[in-house]
Amino acid sequence: MTAAIGLLGGTFDPVHFAHLRLAVEAAEQLQLASVRWIPSGQPGHRGAPAAGADHRLAMLRLAIADEPRFALDEADARSAAPTYTVDTLVRLRTELGAKVPLVLIIGADQMLALDTWREWKRLFDLAHIAVAERPRFELRAGALTGDLAAEFARRATEPAALERTPAGGITSFRMTPLDISASAIRAATAAGRTPRYLLPDAVLDYIASHHLYSTEESSR
């Protein structure tokens, strides 16, 4: 068996402690060899991030520098084209091969809308999906409908089984509930309030030194 690699995507605009706890708890509970952070460049499903790719990559490097299980994947952030999860997984399969177990880490709210993602059924050919649950955001079969419910019923598995096959399973794990959001951090910064203790000090210092998310930055 080959140890599984976790994949955590997002804009990380900015990265904060809830992101970091999600990644480390996924690594521990799913017995992942590593977690690869994959910040998006131009997300295909939403507007452009407030901070540019170089800034978001720099903040991520600072945030994960002391965790040997974490690695940064810059390819999507450097891409000028819109990025979709299915395309990212195809790229990683080409890079890592067909046999390594890949585990896409998402939230329960994302799982409930998975059937709106581009080529969503193809995702199961490329990776497992691990759903992070927290209060009010839990994975329940009754909340899924149609084809998504059928896929869940067919693919539900235990975390320990993820490393036995390269892709195709759906599992869940509990994460510490932390009510932290990047949008709230951006809003606090724009209003002149400090988001300290919501994100690593090194990231906070980077935001301050580069005037990110502030009215000063937005007027440039």
Image: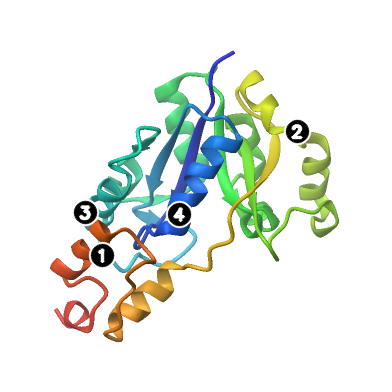
Give 127 or 134, whichever is nearer the viewer: 134
Residue for badge 3: 54
Q: Residue, x 68% and y 61% (percent of image)?
A: 137
Report if the CB atoms under discs 1 and 2 are less than 8 Å apart.
Answer: no
Report if the CB atoms under discs 3 and 4 are less than 8 Å apart.
Answer: no
Which amino acid, by three-letter code, is at mark 3?
Answer: Asp
The tag earlier along the polypeptide, 3 or 4, is 4
Residue for badge 1: 204
Q: Residue, x 48% and y 51% (percent of image)?
A: 21
Give 84 or 31, whichever is nearer the viewer: 31
At numbered mark 4, what does the secondary structure look like: helix, strand or loop?
helix
- Residue occupying the far top of the picture: 1
55 left or right of 181 in image: left
- Gap in Å between the C-alphas at discs 3 and 1? 16 Å
Above/below status of 176 relative to 165:
below
Task: Point out the frontmost of discs 4 and 2.
Answer: 4
At numbered mark 1, what does the secondary structure look like: helix, strand or loop?
helix
Q: Residues within 10 Å of mark 1 (few under 14, many from 20)?
A: many
Tell me where residue 161 appears, x and y as whole percent: 69, 25
The tag earlier along the polypeptide, 3 or 2, is 3
Residue for badge 4: 19
Residue 157: numbered disc: 2
Which amino acid, by three-letter code, is at mark 1?
Answer: Leu
Above/below status of 124 relative to 39:
above
- Gap in Å between the C-alphas at discs 1 and 2? 39 Å
At numbered mark 3, what does the secondary structure look like: helix, strand or loop?
helix
Q: Residue, x 42% and y 72% (percent of image)?
A: 183
At numbered mark 2, what does the secondary structure look like: helix, strand or loop?
loop
Q: Residue, x 43% and y 22% (percent of image)?
A: 96
- Gap in Å between the C-alphas at discs 1 and 4? 15 Å
